[in-house]
Image (tube, coloured by chain):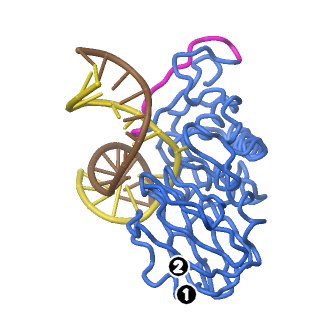
Chain colours: A blue, B brown, C yellow
Amino acid sequence: MPELPEVETTRRGITPHITGQHLVKLIIRQPQLRWLITENLGQHIMGARLEVIDRRAKYLLFKFSSGYVLIHLGMSGSLRILDNTATAGKHDHVDFIFSNNRLLRFTDPRRFGAILWLGENPWQHKLLKNLGPEPLSEHFTGFDLYQRAKGRKLAVKQFIMDQHNVTGVGNIYANEALFLSGIRPGTQTGRISIKRYERLVEQIKRVLTQAIAQGGTTLRDFVGGDGKPGYFKQQLFVYGRGGQACKRCHKTLKEIRHSGRSTVYCLNCQK
DNA sequence: ATAATCACCTGCTCGC
DNA sequence: TGCGAGCAGGTGATTA
């Protein structure tokens, strides 16, 4: 699933094709996603104009003239622009058809994604109101992260993957950012200096920015709104490379499991 | 409040 | 070739 760079790549890919257009048809083939798609979603947005597609954390927020639709891609979701003549496959759960004949298709084999009607005041919604800072904003600083980490004992990797502390970082980029900043993933949050948090924040910003520039990371099936894969995979230092040689020091990368998620790091480069 | 585990779902890869 | 086990980009709910 998409982490922030893949969600942002999707947003940028689909935006020019459908913003300013009116919704003329909505097809829901499978309403049971992570939660049931809001009942009567069609009635809320039919005929409405899509004004802008925004992003908060890994959520996409479609601002229609009538209110907001939230879309999350879960682990395996994607959004693509197609012709409205396109035939639907097994996991093509929802089609939004616009006045310019473009079709926005939501596909999600595992159905961990979500499509919800949030109405006119989305920021009060419980999914959005308690999120941490956007990683690429000026509000996300080493000092901020250090303050949030103080006195806590969980592993720093889980800490930065918790969307209440900083948004957008998932398993791939958590592994990468920790490698780039030389911090072992299992280190307890409260035992890391502010200096090292500053470095970590710097590297989170850097890896996310570079991944966006490359169109995200395609492992198996991620495609941006234009159907193209992301090219960041070849830049990964540790994710998916357990047992292989570290690109910096050539020692063997260690792979372990932290609360069910694969964690890869270099014993030599990360302390 | 914090931390760890479970749950949701399908598809693919691996070892036998 | 077949089959079960384990794993996959997320995160809210549940449990200690």
**Label number found at residue A117:** 2
Which element is circle 1 on?
A: helix
Q: Position of residue A41 (x, y in %)?
A: 50, 81
Letter of the chain that mark 1 sits on in the rendering = A
Picture layout, residue A199 above or below residue A7: above
Horizontally, residue A126 falls left or right of residue A143, namely: left
Does the magenta-highlighted stretch encompass residue A252? yes
Letter of the chain that mark 2 sits on in the rendering = A
Q: Which residues are magenta?
A: A248-260
Q: Are marks 2 and 1 in contact (CB under 8 Å)?
A: yes
What main secondary structure does the magenta stretch of the protein show? loop
Q: Nearer the viewer, residue A73 or A104?
A: A104
Comparing labels 2 and 1, the label whose residue is closer to the camera: 1
Q: Which residue is mark 1?
A: A44
- Residue at point 71% right, 62% down? A14
Q: Position of residue A216 (x, y in %)?
A: 68, 44
Establish whether labels 2 and 1 are both on one chain. yes
Q: Amino acid at mark 1?
A: His
Q: Amino acid at mark 2?
A: Trp
Q: Determine crowd level at label 2: few under 14, some 14-19, many 20+ residues with C-alpha closer than 10 A.
A: many
Q: Nearer the viewer, residue A24 or A269?
A: A24
Does the magenta-highlighted stretch encompass residue A270? no
- Residue at point 73% right, 78% down? A21
- Residue at point 47% right, 43% down? A153
Tell me the quarter of the picture where residue A148 sits.
bottom right
Q: Earlier in the sequence, mark 2 or mark 1?
A: 1
Picture layout, residue A159 above or below residue C1: below
Which element is circle 2 on?
A: strand
- Residue at point 74% right, 47% down? A212
Q: Position of residue A267 (x, y in %)?
A: 57, 19
Q: Determine crowd level at label 1: few under 14, some 14-19, many 20+ residues with C-alpha closer than 10 A.
A: some
Picture layout, residue A205 above or below residue A256: below
